[in-house]
Amino acid sequence: MPAGYEKMRDEFIQKGMKKKNAQKKAARIWNSKHPDNPVGKGERRGKK
């Protein structure tokens, strides 16, 4: 995982957010700013 994503995620956890929610929020922010280098499970799938 990119270091920037992990830093964001850890900051959200430090603020009291649950790990799963922190991962979702950090991934949404990271993916919106870095569309060419997304984080998440597996490959990105487009709309059918």
Image: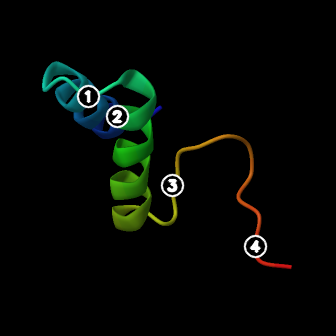
Kindly identify which residue carries mark 3: 37
- Measure the alpha-carbon separation of dots 4 and 1: 30 Å
Residue that protrudes farthest toward the bottom in the picture: 48
- Which circle, 4 or 2, is nearer the viewer? 2
First-in-chain label (3 vs 1): 1
Question: Please, what secondary structure does the residue beneath circle 1 have?
Answer: loop
* Category of crowding for the residue at label 4, using alpha-carbon neighbours closer than 10 angstroms: few (below 14), some (14–19), many (at least 20): few
- How far is disc 4 from disc 3 in space, using C-alphas? 16 Å
- Write down the quadrant of residue 40 in the picture: top right
What residue is pinned by disc 1? 17
Residue to which mark 2 is pinned = 22
> In the rendered structure, which amino acid carries the disc numbered 1?
Met
Q: Is residue 32 above or below residue 25?
A: below
Does residue 15 lie above or below 8 as drawn? above
* Residue type of the residue flagged with mark 3: Asn
Query: What is the three-letter code of the residue carrying label 4?
Result: Gly
Q: Name the disc covering residue 46, or none.
A: 4
